[in-house]
Image (spheres, rainbow, N blue to C red):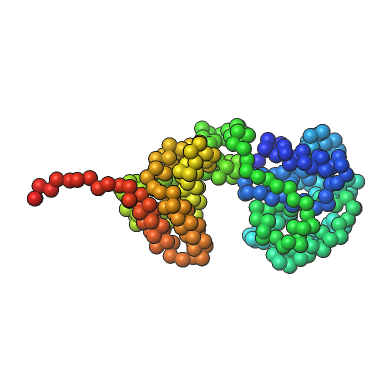
Amino acid sequence: MPDSPLPWHRPQWQQLNERRAQGRFPHALLLTGPEGVGKSHFARQFAQSLLCNSPLATGPACDDCRACLLVRAGSHPDLSLVSPLEGKKSISVDQVRGVGHYLSLKSQYGRHKVVVVSPADSMNVNAANSLLKTLEEPNEGSVLILTTSRPAQLPATIRSRCQELRFGEVVQKEAAPWLKSQLEGDENPLTLLALAGGAPLKALRMADKELVSLRKDLFTGLERLAAQGADPISLANQWVKADTQRGLYWMYSWITDMVRLKATAAAPKISNEDMVQPLARLAAGASLQALLQQQERVVTVLRQEEQNLNLQLLLEDLLIEWRNCFAATKQRPFVQDDRI
């Protein structure tokens, strides 16, 4: 990950700078938005800015002072990063109690005491209740920054005591050039952004030629199935052996784009910009109602997949229904039978 602020975070920096100037800076921030847009990166960057001796006028830290060097080395005494311990899925109550004690101490460098909790939705119930006490009685100079892609998973009592800073969908014209500058190979940034649902940091993690190839293979299979030229059972077996969940998310994204292409006369905004033409061809072969129903089926299979049901059968049913979406538009050609 780069150490500099990300280009699509300018609005968030501006918001916090305005709050600073107006003297309305919160003691607790809740950063929300889709996975992979850089919330945790922003949290660390902003924490460094709060501790920096000479932050820039635009908000970010100078990156040169002693405080910045300590933050980058992971040894600044006034900054604590809290996340699930290695091998654990949740943040424990003991970790959160430690946060309360840490924030009760005076800053060693006379500025702020900052704690970043990421992802905040990974706190268990007892941990969340313990954090509530810290939020209700903040210490002067303390700043608590929570990040989450699932704010609804946090108790309302915690959300109400934080000022939310929203990170929405990233504009592709900002993300694509940045992503291209981070890639070492010749990967197409638009393809990677499509793979990641438009999330740049997620796309950077997915810069894998095998993954790009898998996406292409799964889509080709769906194309052949729509043309009645493939077997849904064989294709389901291929999906089971591959990355099933990711394939289902891709399928949902493809169908969503097909619905947009089908329902909008003007050129719609779609996620899979590298596949506009094949998606348009597929969309022309099915009714809008059939595509919407198929979209709901994919969501259902994703939920059932989490319940450890028979994945092979779930995928077979889904792909049979996918084939049926296009069957009505396919005319069986007349073939002369020499036996007649």
Q: Residue furthest bottom?
A: 126
How many numbered circles are shown? Answer: 0
Where is residue 87? Give x, y as percent: 63, 60
Residue at 88% across / 50% down in the picture? Answer: 141
Where is residue 292? Give x, y as percent: 46, 52
Q: Nearer the viewer, residue 262 or 81?
A: 262
Q: Nearer the viewer, residue 193 or 322?
A: 322
Q: Residue furthest front?
A: 265
Q: Is residue 29 visible?
A: yes
Where is residue 51? Give x, y as percent: 83, 43
Q: Does residue 202 appear to the left or right of 130 in the view shown?
A: left
Where is residue 335? Give x, y as percent: 17, 46
Residue at 74% across / 57% down in the picture? Answer: 159
Q: Does residue 78 appear to the left or right of 232 in the view shown?
A: right
Q: Is residue 85 visible?
A: no
Residue at 74% across / 64% down in the picture? Answer: 127
Identify whether 217 is placed above or below 315: above
Q: Quadrant of the N terminus?
A: top right
Identify whether 245 is placed above or below 211: below
Residue at 44% across / 49% down in the picture? Answer: 288
